[in-house]
Amino acid sequence: METIAIASLHGCWDLASWRRIGPDGGETYPYTRSARGRLIYEPGGRMAVFLMRPDWGEASVADGFIAYSGRFETRPGEIHHLIDLASQKPLVDLPQVRQASFVDGVLRLAAPGRDDPTARHELDWRRADG
């Protein structure tokens, strides 16, 4: 597996899709098919991510919004998010390891589910306009 060049990540990314693939291959959408998100990678090695249900005002923070920031680094086939601030306390100081790949300009980050390690979460990100 190749290491993704850090410079290719720099900038702002918008969430294109977030799906959870169960052990049976079935797909669900944790924050609905219309989930919104922003991922930012800075040249100095800092990152931030925000994920939101489109109907977040009707959901609790725990059920409708995730945000965290910290440092990031790349390894072969992976991006590691090293979190120091988060909307959910258990995420602080818990490295988030993501399998990473580019497909037609889309950045795909994937990881096992925290609730069920046999499930897989795939988040596709497109470069933000402007």
Image (spheres, rainbow, N blue to C red):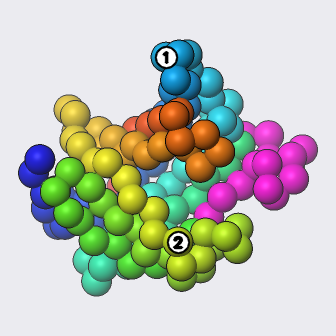
Q: Earlier in the sequence, mark 2 or mark 1?
A: 1
Query: In the image, 19: left or right of 1?
Result: right
Q: Amino acid at mark 1?
A: Gly
Specify the quadrant of the image occupied by residue 11.
Answer: bottom left
Above or below, 46 against 80 in this view is: below
Could you tell me residue 33's position as x and y percent?
A: 61, 27
Find out whether residue 61 is within the magenta segment: yes
The residue carrying pointer 2 sits among few (fewer than 14), some (14 to 19) or many (20 or more) residues within 10 Å by Cα, namely few
Find out whether residue 59 is within the magenta segment: yes
Which residue does the image show at 41% across and 68% down from the upper left?
Answer: 81
Q: Secondary structure at mark 2?
A: loop
The residue carrying pointer 1 sits among few (fewer than 14), some (14 to 19) or many (20 or more) residues within 10 Å by Cα, namely few
Compare residues 81 and 105 and report the one nearer the observer.
81
Residue at the spot of label 2: 94
Query: In the image, 101: left or right of 35?
Result: left
Which residue does the image show at 28% across and 83% down from the upper left?
Answer: 44
The magenta stretch is 54-67
Which residue does the image show at 79% across and 56% down from the upper left?
Answer: 62
Which residue does the image show at 65% across and 36% down from the upper left?
Answer: 30
* Residue 34 visible in the snapshot: yes
Query: In the image, 6: left or right of 31?
Result: left
The span from disc 2 to disc 1 (Cα, nearest Å) is 28 Å
Q: Amino acid at mark 2?
A: Leu
Q: Which mark is residue 25?
A: 1
Above or below, 38 against 122 in this view is: below
Compare residues 17 and 112 and report the one nearer the observer.
112
